[in-house]
Amino acid sequence: MTVYNFCAGPAMLPPEVMKKAQAEFLNWQGLGVSVMEVSHRAKPFLAMVEECEASLRRLMNISDDFEVLFMHGGGRGQFAAVPLNLHQNDAPGFYIENGIWSSGATKEGAKFTDVASLNIRCDEQSTFDIQPVNDWQLPEKASFIHYCPNETIDGIEIFDVPKHQSAPIVADMSSMILSREINVDEFDLIYAGAQKNIGPSGLCIVIVRKTLLERDGLPRPAILDYAIEAKQGSMYNTPPTFAWYLAAEVFSYLEAQGGVPAMEAHNKEKAALLYNYIDSSDFYSNKVAAHCRSLMNVPFWLQDDDLNAAFLAQAEAAGLVALEGHRFVGGMRASIYNAMPIEGIKALIAFMDKFAKEHS
Ligand SMILES: *Cc1c(COP(=O)(O)O)cnc(C)c1O
C-alpha cells in the first residue's frame, strides 16, 4: 500500500532523495564510509557544502549581499538568535503576531530585548482572518520587524512582504521556504528550520544581509552568533553533517525538477484541489479567509468532532497518515509540502469523500 504522509514536521522528503541517501548510506562518494563518519573539514565534505550553498543560492536567487548559514537549533534556535544578534539600544524588536509560531517568537524575544507586538488577526465568528500587510501599523523605530509568512498550525499564509524604511525585515520561513518564488532582496534575514521543505530536523538555514553582521547585539553563545558562523563557514563547532548532506541532496533534486517556479505551480495546483473540495463539501470546512490560505498546511474540520477519531483511524488504514490537527486548533491538518505528490492529494480527497458519504 502506498502511504502518504501529511505530517506537519518532520515531514515527508522526496522519495527519490531518500532512495539515493539509502544507496550511498554506507559508502559515500566511494570513500567506503558514511557521510556521517567523515570529518566536516575533509575535502569531500567541504566540496559538498560549497555546492549545497551554491545550489540554494541558485534556487532562491540569493545575491552576494547575503550570507547563507547552516546553523543548529532549528527554527526556535533563531527565536533567540534574532534578538541576540540584531538588538539595538532604544529600539524594540517588533513582532507581527498572527498565530502560534509568531507568538512563540515574541515570547522568546522578550527574554532578551524590549519587544513590541502587533496582533494582525481579525477573526470573525468562525473565520480566521488577518489584516492585509498594507494596513499594518509599524513603528518608526525598531531593531527589526519579525513575522511568520506561513503559520504552520493555523494554516495562515501572508503573501505580501512588509516594508520598512530602516528596520530590517526578518521572516520565519520554516514551513514555506522553497515552496513559492520570493524576492530575497525584500528581506534582511530569512530563517527556516529544515524539517518541512529541506531535510532532517535540527538544521536551520539562515540567510542574512551582510550589513547586519556588523551589529553588536547582545552577549550571546558563539553557536548563535551570525558573524562567527559566517566567518567560520558555519563550522564554528561540528555542524549537523548528515542533515546538511541531505539538504544538499534535496536542493539538487529541486533544481532538477525545475526549481522553485516548478514547485510553486505544483503546490498551487495541489492546494487548489484540496481547498476546492473542502469548500464544495457540507461535511468539511476550512476556516481561513481565502486571501490568506496556506499553500502548505491545510487545516480542516469535520462537521461533527465526534467523528474525528473514526476519520483518523480509517484514514490511517487507507495509508493517509498524520492528519490529526494540532492540539491548539483541533480538527485535521493536511501538510502538503513540496515533497507531497498530487496523487497524495487525490487519494486524500477520495477518502474524505467516501467518509463523508458514509457518515452524512
Ligand atoms: C516548525 C516551525 C518552527 C520550529 O522549528 P523547530 O525546528 O522545532 O525549532 C518554527 N517556526 C515555524 C513557522 C515552524 O513551522
Image (cartoon, rainbow, N blue to C red):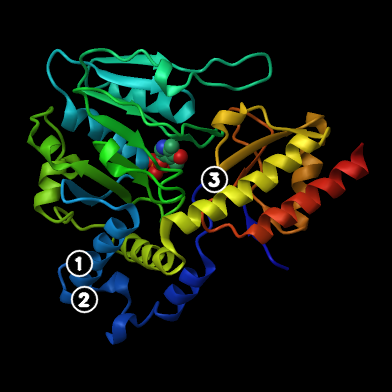
Q: CA distance from mark 1 to mark 3?
A: 30 Å
350 shown above or below 334: below
Residue 113: assigned label: none
Q: Is mark 3 within 8 Å of ligand 1?
A: yes
Report whether residue 239 is seen: yes
Label 2: few (<14), some or many (≥20) within 10 Å? some
Instruction: State ligand 1's quadrant.
Output: top left
Residue 8: assigned label: 3
Q: Which amino acid type corresponds to the residue marked 3 in the rendered image?
A: Ala
Q: Please give the name of the residue rendered at 31% of the width and 42% of the height, measured from the top-left corner.
A: 191
Q: Which structural element holds mark 2?
A: helix
Residue at mark 2:
44
75 shown above or below 60: above
Which label lies toward us, 1 or 3? 3
Relative side of 72 to 357, left or right: left
Asked if the residue under mark 3 is in contact with the one under mark 1, i.e. CB atoms within 8 Å, the reply is no
Quadrant assignment, res 83:
top left
Spot occupied by residue 66 in the image (x, y as percentages of width and height) = 19, 46
Q: Earlier in the sequence, mark 3 or mark 2?
A: 3
Report whether residue 79 is seen: no
Spot occupied by residue 58 in the image (x, y as percentages of width and height) = 30, 59
Q: CA distance from mark 3 to mark 2?
A: 33 Å
Total marks placed: 3
Q: In front here: 116 or 123?
A: 123
Residue at mark 1:
40
Q: Earlier in the sequence, mark 1 or mark 3?
A: 3
